[in-house]
Image: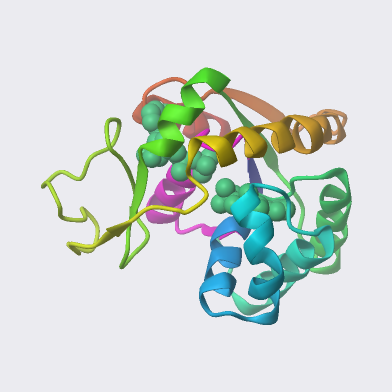
Amino acid sequence: MNIILLGPPGAGKGTQAQRLVAERGMTQLSTGDMLRAAVKAATPVGLKAKAVMEAGELVSDEIVSGIIGEALDALDVGAGVIFDGYPRTAAQAHSLDGILSDRGRTLDHVIELDVDEDALVERITGRFTCATCGAGYHDTFKQPKVAGECDVCHGHEFKRRPDDNEETVRTRMAEYRAKTAPILPIYEERGIVSRVDGMADIDDVAKAIDAILD
Ligand code: ADP
Ligand code: AMP
């Protein structure tokens, strides 16, 4: 089963993808995570992407579709893929069709996390992750069970993203509205879009997604 989690920055895509990985053995392909790793490693892709990401704008379609194809070939994706943060433009949606059909795969569901934009700034400015395993947390909505200790790997170091500031978030939301939201009709025509209330509690969002996948 291959699915897209679609929604603006802070909608909860990564949170739900991490849970699906843990509970269903699916593979999360987050172009944001892959680009951040490329920036950290100062690869040619990372060097091109760094300033664009810091500004909250979109990295080129060629770069992101390239890394998605490479990741699909490199990973064991037997239990299915969760596309998180990709596709973000009509060109990427068309590339994904080709990438999947070349590999004999199909897209089963596009799950749109429907959220109130006013809540997203608070979600994003309160976001932090475990520096060791990448598990996601929030200052208010999802604190580690033991303060200062990751629930998953028991690490004690956490980090915040440089682009998780209010100004950049506004640009990222504008990019979502202008370039990503308009790709929904491509999938609506195929009858594979489901909408989930992303403003619900994390566990209730999870239940709604499970009801779609089961
Ligand atoms: P995205 O991957 O869509 O950008 P995240 O999954 O990283 O979003 O979520 C953004 C922040 O909001 C994180 O800190 C996360 O813990 C928190 N969060 C995710 N889902 C919810 C929810 N349903 N209610 C409250 N906070 C949430
Ligand atoms: P995310 O982790 O999904 O919030 O993405 C962080 C940043 O990485 C975005 O603001 C973009 O600059 C870049 N990015 C991630 N995925 C894509 C994509 N599919 N297309 C273009 N840029 C992307």
Q: For residue 5, which quarter of the picture?
A: top right
- Give the residue displayed 45% in from the left and 59% down from the top: 25
Q: For residue 31, which quarter of the picture?
A: bottom right
User: Is residue 18 found inside the magenta-colored segment of the image?
Assistant: yes
**Left or right side of 192 for 5:** left
Nearer to me, 102 or 178: 178
Residue 187 appears in the picture as rendered: no
Q: Which residues are magenta?
A: 6-30
**Left or right side of 137 for 102:** right
- Give the residue displayed 69% in from the left and 51% down from the top: 86
Nearer to me, 67 or 187: 67
Q: Is residue 144 above or below residue 46?
A: above
Q: Is residue 26 above or below residue 43?
A: above
Residue 44 appears in the picture as rendered: yes
Image coordinates for residue 163, horizontal then vertical, percent? 52, 49
Image coordinates for residue 104, horizontal then vertical, percent? 80, 64
- Give the residue displayed 33% in from the left and 65% down from the top: 133
**Left or right side of 193 for 128:** left
**Left or right side of 143 for 109:** right
Q: For residue 141, which quarter of the picture?
A: top left
